[in-house]
Image (tube, rainbow, N blue to C red):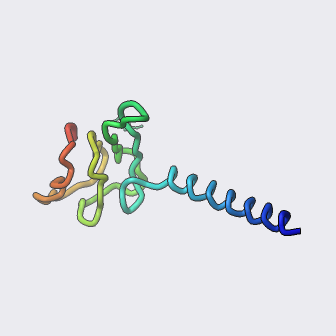
Amino acid sequence: MATQGFRILFKHVTAVLVWISLLALCEACVSPPSCQCDMIGPAKRPRGRKVNCSKQPNPFKTLTGITFPPDSVTLDLSFNKLVQLKQRSFIQLSKLKKL
Ligand SMILES: *[C@@H]1O[C@H](CO)[C@@H](O)[C@H](O)[C@H]1NC(C)=O
């Protein structure tokens, strides 16, 4: 009796865990969600992220309020409609090599 309840509970916990990991995988690295992100380097020791914002449905006009992951190594902002860049837009991106 108790064992069965335990099993059902276990199933639920597993389902929730699967969901959480799926959500983590789909989690957009840029906020608000827009760009495509890929890890660069070996999976065990990633060197950072490649952030590609060139194919997003709503091109950026400004980078105000947009957060890029601090480990971005490349950032593709082509095809956006940026009209102004602020001095501090990229300040936390210490690994950035290519823009
Ligand atoms: C970003 O994606 C576009 C479209 O898929 C591609 O043409 C472009 O080369 C990519 N940029 C980088 C830096 O990979």
Judged from the image, the quadrant occupied by ligand 1 is top left
Pick the front one: 91 or 3: 3
Q: Quadrant of residue 49?
A: top left
Quadrant containing the N terminus in the rendered view: bottom right
Residue 12 in percent (x, y) is at 72, 63
Q: Looking at the image, which residue sits at the far top? A: 42
- In this picture, is 95 found above or below 31? above
Pick the front one: 52 or 44: 44
- The residue that appears at 31% across and 46% down in the rendered structure is 79
Image label count: 0
Q: Looking at the image, which residue sits at the far left? A: 87
Residue 47 in percent (x, y) is at 31, 36
Quadrant containing the C terminus in the rendered view: top left
- In this picture, is 5 found above or below 14? below
Pick the front one: 84 or 68: 68
Residue 81 in percent (x, y) is at 27, 54
Q: Looking at the image, which residue sits at the far right? A: 1
Pick the front one: 77 or 12: 12
- The residue that appears at 36% across and 31% down in the rendered structure is 41
Relative placement, left or right, of 12 versus 44 is right
- In this picture, is 11 found above or below 76? below
Residue 86 in percent (x, y) is at 13, 60
- The residue that appears at 43% across and 54% down in the rendered structure is 28
- The residue that appears at 39% across and 30% down in the rendered structure is 42
Relative placement, left or right, of 20 versus 41 is right
Q: Quadrant of residue 30?
A: bottom left
Relative placement, left or right, of 7 versus 35 is right
Relative placement, left or right, of 30 versus 84 is right
